[in-house]
Structure formats: C-alpha cells, structure tokens
Amino acid sequence: MKLLSVIVPCYNEEENVPFFYEEFLKNELYFKEKGIDWEILYVDDGSKDNTAEEVRKLHISDERVHLLSFSRNFGKEAAMYAGMEKAKGDYVVIMDADLQDPPSLLPEMFAGLEEGYDSVATRRVTRKGEPAIRSFFARMFYRLMKKISRTEIMDGARDYRLMNRKMVDAILSMQEYNRFTKGIFGWVGFQTKWLEFENVKRLKGETKWNFWKLLWYSIDGITAFSTAPLSFAAVMGVLFCVLAFVLILFIIVRTLIFGDPVSGWPSLVCILSLISGVQLFCLGILGQYLAKTYMEVKKRPIYLLKEEL
C-alpha cells in the first residue's frame, strides 16, 4: 500500500484538532479503494493552549496520528519543514487545522497525480470574509512578485498541496533558514496542477495572521526570491547623482546670470530631506538582505523538538 503523510501545522488550535481528524476520516473509504494508508502529523508550533494534549488523545485511540511539538514558536514555515522532514509517505499533503483547506478535495487532488502531475496545489478564487485592505495588499504582492521574480507564485495560492516523494525530497534539499515555502514550491519546479476553490471560513478560533505579520511575511518572500530591490536601490543612487549634477549646473548658471545665491532655501531643504529619505530607504533594503545573510551564516537549526509521538 502507498502511504499518505498529512502535515498539519498548529498554533493554538486545540478546538480544531479533533474536528480536522473527523473531517479527514470522511475520505477513509476512498483511501481503502485506492490502497492508500495514511498518517497525520500534527506539528505543534509552541502553542500556549492544549493543542498538544488534544493530539495525544487522538494518538491513544489511533496510532496513525502523530505529534511533533516544538520547544517554542518557530513559525509555520518551520512547522511545514519539520513535517516534511519527518513524513514517511509516498505522498505528502500540507493542510491547515482550521479546515480552510477542505479535506474533501483530496480525491480530486489524487486524480491529478494519477494524470502524471508531481503535485496538485490549491488557490482561492475569492477572498470573502477577509478585510478589504488585506485582500488588496495580498493581490498587489502577488502582482509585484510576478514582475520582479522568476519564480512562479500564483495569486491566491494556499499551502494546501499534495506532492509526490520526489518533489518533497527536492524541497527538503533546500535547507535555508529564511524560508518562504510558496516561493520554494515554484523554485523547485516539477509539474503542478492547480485546483481552484472558494474561500472557506475558519471552523473555530481566530486567524494568527494580522496585517503586520503578513507585511513582514511578504518582505521575506521578496528578499528570498528576488534581488530587484537591490537593483532599485542602485538605480535610485544613479538617478539622484545625475539630478544633483543637473541642479549644481542650474544653480551655477542662475547665479552667474541673476546673482542672489541665497534665495531658494525652502526648496533646498525639501530636496535634502527627499534625498536623505531615499538614502535611508536604500540602506534599509540593503539591511534586509544583510540581515537574511547574517541569519543564514549562523547555521542555526530551523526548529527544535520538545516532544515527538
């Protein structure tokens, strides 16, 4: 029998853990017909509630349910990597515990693999239930990434993806500390089929992603898969050097013709402020890449386990 490994990152999801298990079991008949065994790896990302305890209860009644518990909160990216590293399956799927990734799509996803695809990924065609400003910036992020990166990142893409072992091993070979899995999925290549579905609301609890977390996550994605911001900083430097040279010539000519070199100090202050702001902005871009490099060269582990069932 083939083995399916289901990776479920969890952070304060004690209410959703048992419901996800029950919903997943609705595919049991399909798995038996296809000769597929399965295991669920709940990855407890340093939860402060009883998420781990709920998984232990499930493990007692069903040994196919496993627990990976982090020593602290390392983030969803680390949780997904840990799950793939521990997964033993011929197929691996990543799903959220809040049922925003419907387990009912799994038969259709397996059909995609049977067609010869290496992975079947999902994307939302609507963003109903999300704040309007967050939806707007999310769309802008995907548009920007398409323009500045060679890596394919689909608009509305979820982490909900079914992959064969070959693709999972390729992802695991990328052991970078600063991980942006949506970009990694595209970077490793392989044939991917996309399934579209409408946005599903969380079953219980509240999302852990607010606007600022998503903003920093998008910055991680940009710095991880594009050097365009560095090129932008260089171009801005050249443009302002040219502008400064033109202004110097303009001031010299004006002084020689009209005299009065003192007037115009308000505009001078504005120009200095603008140039200083651009310089600091470009230094910030350089600082982001330097910070990522600094974290990579430390070679710290991506995660630390406190408990494993």
Image (tube, helix red, strand yellow):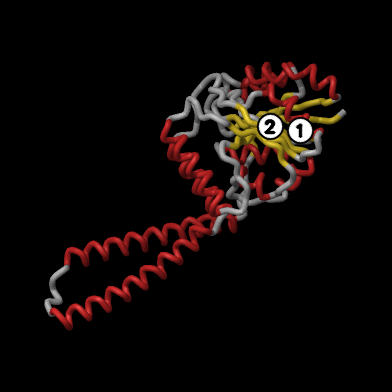
- Viewed as shown, does residue 20 lie left or right of 251? right
* SS at mark 2 in the image: strand
Which residue reaches farthest right?
Answer: 1
- The residue under the point 52% across, 58% down is 228
Which residue reaches farthest front?
Answer: 257
Question: Is residue 307 something one can see in this rendering?
Answer: no
* SS at mark 1 in the image: helix
Q: 144 or 65: nearer the eye?
A: 144
Label 1 near label 2: C-beta < 8 Å? Answer: no
Q: Quadrant of the N terminus?
A: top right
Mark 2, Cα crowd under 10 Å, few <14 / some 14-19 / many 20+, is many
- Viewed as shown, does residue 46 lie left or right of 65? left
Image position, residue 117 (x, y; %): 77, 39
Q: Which residue is mark 2?
A: 7
Q: Quadrant of the C terminus?
A: top right
Quadrant for residue 156, please give it: top right
Image position, residue 187 (x, y; %): 66, 50
Image position, residue 222 (x, y; %): 53, 51
- Viewed as shown, does residue 65 lie left or right of 283? right
Q: Is 276 above or below relative to 95? A: below
Give residue 10's mark: none
Between disc 2 and disc 1, whose residue precedes?
2
Q: Which residue is mark 1?
A: 112
Q: Amino acid at mark 2?
A: Ile
Image position, residue 95 (x, y; %): 65, 30
Mark 2–mark 1 distance (CA, rounded to whole Å)? 19 Å
Q: Is 194 above or below relative to 289? A: above
